[in-house]
Image (cartoon, rainbow, N blue to C red):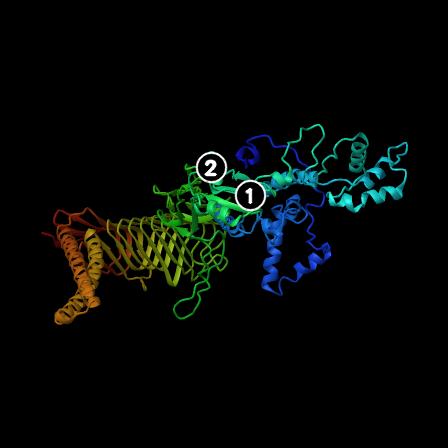
Amino acid sequence: MKLFGRDYFKSGKAKKKKTGRDDNDNQTTPAGGNSTDETVNVTEQTDARPEDAAAAEKKKTDERLNVTENSNLFKLWNEYPESVRGKKFDPLEFMYENIEKTHAELKENFFRIHAHEAVFKDFDDNQKEIAEFMKNLSGYAGKVLRTVSKGFDITQEQIEKIKNVAFDENGEFSETRLKNILLNDSSLASMGGFRSSEELKKIISAVRSGNAVPEKAGADDETPETEETEQLPVFSERDAEIHFKLSADLIHAWVFILPPGENGKDVKASAITEILAENGVISGIDEAVPERIEKEKLYFKLIEAARGKYPVNGTNGKVRELFSRENNQINLVEDEHGRVNNKELGLIRSVRKGDVLAEIELPTAATDGLLVTGEPAEGTDGEYPKVPAGTNTKISEDKKTVTADADGELYFQNGTFNVRKVLKINHDVDLSVGNIDFAGDLIINGNIREGFSVKCSGNMKINGLSESAEISAGGDIFIEKGMFGGSGGSIKAGGNLNCKYLENCRVDISGNLSADQILRCTVSADGFVDVSGAKGRIIGGSITGGKGIRANFIGTQSGMGSNVTLTTGMTSVYLKQRSLKAAELALVEESLAKLMQNIRFLEAKKNSLNQFQKALLEKLVLQTKARKIQRDELTAEIEELDKKSRGSRSAVEIKCGQLRSALEINFDGFKYNINKELNNFRVYKDGPKIIARANGFEKVITDKA
């Protein structure tokens, strides 16, 4: 019994003998002489019946894998009796399911490390190797076919005809009729047939010289005369042959058995086991295959004798972006009543430092498989994704998120998310941009129109004026002109405010205020209020300056409608802070009361509570503890503010060049009213005393112990 191992068929491992190929190998004409057109018609009707579709798909696979009825393998199959070869030529009978399974595994592994836009071809590498194996088998079958003719004799009548054949000067048959007779002679056909004049000439030459008739050429392997032809045994004396193929990835080991001739020996299971061992196949062996092949005489069948395990590639990481890549996109939002504020356009995407911009799914490592040779099959680890992190953004240490590294405007550019620390609006704030709520510094090269809201967490600079609008900044605010508040204008700043004028608006800032004039405004500044510019005028309203108030002129010449309330001293600041803390404490106390009420209700039914109610009771107890801690902290803060207020000795003063208004003064908690026209008016502390003094006027408001 002849064994063909890895070296003969494995691509790239050893030199293979050159074989020819039948010109018709790629045709799809089925047995029985059906034409190609008829085959197409059958294929077009595959939608009609599932079995037709399956047959068409099988036929397509056979053609792709070089298993057709035009191949030398099929011709060799025809040389054997049905009892040996089987009833149907179907070399891939036991492989379709394996091919499909392998294709699915390769495809899944491919897309684990490739984008889904990539293309995975239906004709995968595994199928290409099978196709190459079947091609080599077909080539070898052509050589075996040559041995088939060696048992046939040429009749004496044929020999006489051959001896008398005449050739012209060009070496061609001089008698066309005789040539046709010889080419179509039934006795010659019994030898396998000769299709060309060249082959017939060789026969004629051999007969005339008394030599043996040469072998006829196979369809798939017209071996050049210059290449040595392997000597094969006579067809009838051939033993069964095991052809072996080990896949390039060492995951598959295939065998293909050619049957014996009439006087040859059948295949033995031990021979199959032996060839597997010789080629180092020790894992994934289907132990039942060798015995089954021997018992059932599975000839002309490609069989997977061993199958390893493919590695599982890791998956590439993925990025889930939490913000749209579209810049300057209008995002109108409905409120709970389904109404839309047309000023809330959402054009500016504001983020704060630490805000998560994208979440990253980390890549996974590959899981090793197993080669049929026993070694591990290494997979490919997934790759970390391309992360769209740009200016003023960063990837977290655990590589799971992209966050903003600064307050500012989020925008997408050149494939990355970026944060712009300073936002510039080069026109008025109106319906073209809508309300603004920006985390960072803001510059407006224009005006703020009535009814709009402009907020930022950093500093704000308005190179224009503000109509009746809502302005808020976490830092300083600069307004080149000022604000005419009408009935709803307001300014709030965590830092200082600098402007030319304020009229009919509310101001609440944590720093100092500098303005040229303030008309009928309610102003609260924790720092110093300075109205000492060119006009330097305060007319009407209420002004609080925690660290003092200074103005050139308070009131009007006529004194009409210009009553002013001035509050200064750190006591006023402490009182404002205390008021905020007290309001927060009231909310905590209210929440605490509700929690205690619910706890008492559940504890009254403690013995009959279900699991949900017991869990709820535990949760309420924890919330109560947290609220009590919060209540105690707020109470302590309020007590500290009261203490500071009582012991305040801050060096503050109210100073005015000309007083022309009824004036109510609240100085460190002590109140005093005055309604006189005075020059160089001043209120200050002198030790424990609070003194009001002007030209020709002095009044001790109170002695402060």
Marking on residue 385: none
Q: Quadrant of the N terminus?
A: top right
Q: Given the image, on which type of amino acid does mark 1 rest?
A: Ile
> Residue 49 versus residue 387: which sits nearer the camera?
49
The picture places residue 334, in percent across and down from the top left corner, at: 43, 66
Residue 101 appears in the rendering: yes
Asked if 260 appears above or below 526 in the picture, the reply is above
Circle 1 residues within 10 Å: few <14, some 14–19, many ≥20: many
Instruction: Say what secondary structure mark 2 lies in.
Output: helix
Marking on residue 257: 1
The picture places residue 44, in percent across and down from the top left corner, at: 67, 60
Q: Given the image, on which type of amino acid does mark 2 rest?
A: Glu
The residue singled out by tag 2 in the image is 274
Instruction: Say what secondary structure mark 1 lies in.
Output: strand
> Residue 140 versus residue 587: which sits nearer the camera?
140
Left of 376 or right of it: where is 265?
Answer: right
Left of 647 or right of it: where is 167?
Answer: right
Residue 112 appears in the rendering: no
For residue 539, which quarter of the picture? Answer: bottom left
The picture places residue 286, in percent across and down from the top left corner, at: 44, 46
